[in-house]
Amino acid sequence: MKRAARRPSRAKVAPARAAQQGRTSPDAAIDITPLPDAIGYMLRRAHLVVVKNFMTVCDELNIRPGQYGILTVIENNPGLKQIDVSLALGIKRTNMVALIDILEKRALVRRVVVRADRRSYALHLTPKGKAFMSKLRARSAQHEEEVSAALGENGRAQLLSLLRRLLERLPPIVSDDEI
Amino acid sequence: MKRAARRPSRAKVAPARAAQQGRTSPDAAIDITPLPDAIGYMLRRAHLVVVKNFMTVCDELNIRPGQYGILTVIENNPGLKQIDVSLALGIKRTNMVALIDILEKRALVRRVVVRADRRSYALHLTPKGKAFMSKLRARSAQHEEEVSAALGENGRAQLLSLLRRLLERLPPIVSDDEI
DNA sequence: TATTGTTATACTCTATAACTATA
DNA sequence: TATAGTTATAGAGTATAACAATA
């Protein structure tokens, strides 16, 4: 996330049409949300602003949002296999390898050999991983507070309820065959 | 979006912990939404299922969601410069070039030379582009209906209102200096 | 035969630097 | 000096195919 400073700031864009017609009123400007009725697009923009906010937490602790998800799933379900984490988060098992590699190299996660099934590993947080998650959870809670404040009274619960409805009632992203 | 069929379907994952403890009840399985209280994560998942739904429309008409946004902005604001479209959609002007190239090669959009400022183009839909948008709008409306149905009575309006609040009250994704 | 982890690879989206031509 | 468009390039994130070890 780098800063730059080239052009003067302007929240709205004066369209060429307005200029061509001699109108210079800022009211003629198009809005920064040009597809305000497209649920998919609005979800995308909202996700981006929330993630940008969360990235300040991630940058502090040098972690990616996806890795935060993996750590959380492992912490809440110690002993999971990589394939289970993949399935839970919708990350392909083929892409999970490098992600776990990073977390293992940082000594946050351990791959524990399972005698019952020597194809797979049981994933656990190390003591360092648990301490890390402790910090991460505290900072994440702060972030969630900021988002809640933006959403207003009851807004957070309402939003989560509506998002849950979408996840429950629309076809899932990937059938787990594809993980 | 390819189909595959390797493993038996399972909506929930039986965690190794439960198995190790001898529990095999499906109630012990972890949910497919492992971060149900993280607004950012839930927005991501919801966006993915909605986009997957919208992709059926895009695949039919051989277009990407981002290109749909560009066409919509140009249709609603004929004569905009590339930089204006970039700003409106949060797409860097450097990445806008190839996107407009594609739309121009498909004869949906025209770059019209502006005598008043020969650095820039005025973007317009061609007649073919307008006809295309006509089809696209109709199919998109169908898609929006499906999403609305999933959200239930008033759900759509509530969700849009909450998402708008996030966009208005959290810091913007990019200052327009960075476009 | 099927599953788990792995490697290699490709594709999309996004990001940065540097150039040109115009203003 | 600043802006609009462009090119080249690099980095995420995600996708598929093929393989070894194990069940």
Image: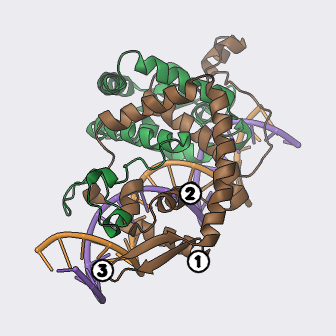
Chain colours: A brown, B green, C orange, D purple
Q: Which residue does the numbered mark 3 point to in the structure image?
A: A116
Dot 3 alpha-carbon crowd within 10 angstroms: few under 14, some 14 to 19, many 20 or more: few
Mark 2 or mark 3, earlier in chain: 2
Please state which of residues B168 and B37 is positioned toward the viewer in this rendering: B37
Label 2 crowd (10 A; few <14 / some 14-19 / many >=20): some
Identity of the residue drawn at 30% across and 50% down: B27
Separation (CA) of disc 3 from disc 1 = 25 Å
x, y percentage for residue B50?
38, 36
The CA span between labels 1 and 2 is 15 Å
Residue C16 drawn at (x, y percent): 70, 56
The residue at 48%/19% (across/down) is B158
Amino acid carrying label 1: it is Lys
Disc 2: which chain?
A: A
Q: Is residue B79 left or right of residue B142?
A: right
Q: Nearer the viewer, mark 2 or mark 3?
A: 3
Q: Can residue B78 be seen?
A: no
Residue occupied by mark 1: A105
Ranked by sequence position, the earlier of labels 3 and 1 is 1
Is the residue at mark 3 from the same chain as the one at mark 1?
yes
- Mark 3 residue element: loop
Front-most of residues C19 and A94: A94
Q: Residues within 10 Å of mark 1 (few under 14, many from 20)?
A: few
Residue on which disc 2 sits: A68
| Residue at position x 64%, y 71% in the image | A128
Chain of the residue under the numbered disc 1 shown in the image: A
Location of residue C1 in the rendering, given as x and y in whole percent from the top left corner: 11, 74
